[in-house]
Amino acid sequence: MSPTETPGSASERSPPGSHLETEELVEEIAKLAKTGASSAQIGAVLRDMHAVPSVRTVTGKRMKAVLKEQNLAPQLPEDLSALLKRVVHLQQHLAKHPYDLSNKRGLTLIESRIRRVSKYYKQRKILAADWHYSAATAALQVE
């Protein structure tokens, strides 16, 4: 963006080299989301294969808003689900290697991070108020 252009100007909304219109971009996002791709993976595909540097510059909305409109937004926020996946992986590792004290500590730290992040999302009403983390149900919530 040059110094004379304002954010949201026409040249910013349609990036050079991008051949997708807003409707086509939303359809492509929906198609990728239905395959189970995360928003980061969708963004990488759009950047690399369709020359779209930012969904927001083309559509005027963030990726999460586009996914919500299409009813494809994930139930859990992506950072929380990534932490749950890490916990499940560490639990499996510790089942095989119960004396791995370093990873036991790592599991404790990740679990405390999950509790902090879930508290943040509950305060902002992104997570249900009755959502609670438990090690036993972490595997079920990831799947």
Image (cartoon, rainbow, N blue to C red):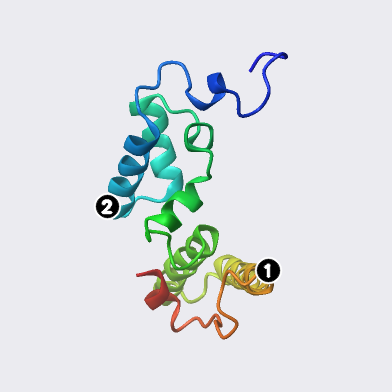
Tag 1 near tag 2, CB within 8 Å: no
Query: For mark 1, does the 10 Å Cα neighbourhood hold few (<14), some (14 to 19), or many (20 or more) residues?
Result: few
Q: Amino acid at mark 1?
A: Tyr
Left or right relative to 97: residue 109: right
Q: Which residue is mark 2?
A: 35
- Residue at x-position 52% and y-position 74%: 99
Q: Residue 52: x and y, percent? A: 43, 28
Mark 1 vs mark 2: which is more N-terminal?
2
Q: Which residue is mark 1?
A: 120
Q: Residue 104: x and y, percent? A: 57, 72
- Residue at x-position 60% and y-position 66%: 106
**Residue furthest to the front:** 10
Q: Which quadrant of the structure image shows residue 36?
A: bottom left
Compared with 8, 26 (above or below) is below
- Residue at x-position 35% and y-position 38%: 23
How much space separates mark 1 and mark 2, taking CA atoms? 29 Å
Q: Secondary structure at mark 1?
A: helix
Q: Amino acid at mark 2?
A: Thr
Q: Which quadrant of the structure image shows residue 18?
A: top left
Q: What label sits on residue 24 in the rendered view?
A: none
Q: Residue 122: x and y, percent? A: 64, 74
| Quarter placement of the N terminus | top right
Q: Which quadrant of the structure image shows residue 20?
A: top left
| Quarter placement of the C terminus | bottom left
- Residue at x-position 44% and y-position 58%: 68
